[in-house]
Structures are given as C-alpha cells and as structure tokens.
Amino acid sequence: METTTVSTRGQVVLPKRLREKHCWQTGQKLEVIDTGDGLLLKTRQTASWDDVVGCLSHLAAGKKPAPTDEQMHAAVRQMAVQRYRRGAAR
C-alpha cells in the first residue's frame, strides 16, 4: 500500500508507480468522488488521441514497434467491452 501526505495547501503527491500505471501526466484532469469511506480518483473520460498515444511513449524507446491504427482501435474496443462487462456485473 502506498501512502502520501496532505500539504498545508491541501495538495497530495500521487506515487510515481501509480501515476505511471494509470498514464497520468502533469496536468491530467481527475474526477474526485467521495465514496463515504474515502475518495476515488478517476480519469476524466475526455481523452484525446494525443493523450492515448502519450501513454505509449515507452514503446517508442525502441523495445517494441509502435502499434498500428487498427491495433489501437482494437485495444480501445477491447477495453470498452471489459469496462462494460464489469459495470454490468455489479
């Protein structure tokens, strides 16, 4: 479990590992939801293609070729189906 501290200005630093896992960059807009027993941070659902491609910058380091447009569209469709199924199962 990661921990952080609230600053005197009400700010918190999100651990780097979690920012990278969720592809959160400087300036990322997050929804803050009060769950009653804590807070839930969610990425705003207004991502552009530039935001999506930015999450793949590690691929540009030369370890893997960049995905094609078709692969990107297939991945987005797959994630949408997974999210829908998780929501429908609740």
Image: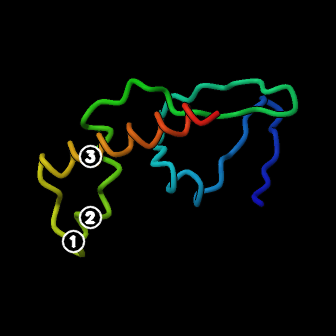
Question: Which amino acid, mark 3?
Answer: Val
Tell me: 81 left or right of 90.
Answer: left
Distance of label 1 from label 2 (alpha carbons): 5 Å
Asked whether the beta carbons under mark 3 and mark 1 sit within 8 Å of each other, the answer is no
Between 81 and 52, which is closer to the camera in this rendering? 81
Q: Which residue is mark 3?
A: 53
Q: Secondary structure at mark 1?
A: loop
Q: What residue would you read off at disc 1?
A: 64
Q: Residue at x 31, y 47 (%)?
A: 54
Categorize mark 3 by other alpha carbons within 10 Å: few (<14), some (14-19), many (20+): few
Secondary-structure class at tag 2: helix
SS category of the residue bearing label 3:
helix
Residue annotated with mark 2: 59
Q: In this view of the protein, which residue sits in the foreground, 71 or 38? A: 71
Reading the chain from its start, which is encountered first: label 3 or label 1? 3
Q: Is residue 1 left or right of residue 23?
A: right
**Toward the viewer: 56 or 68?**
68
Q: Mark 2: which amino acid?
A: Leu
Instruction: In the rendered view, tell whether residue 13 sits above or below residue 37.
Output: below
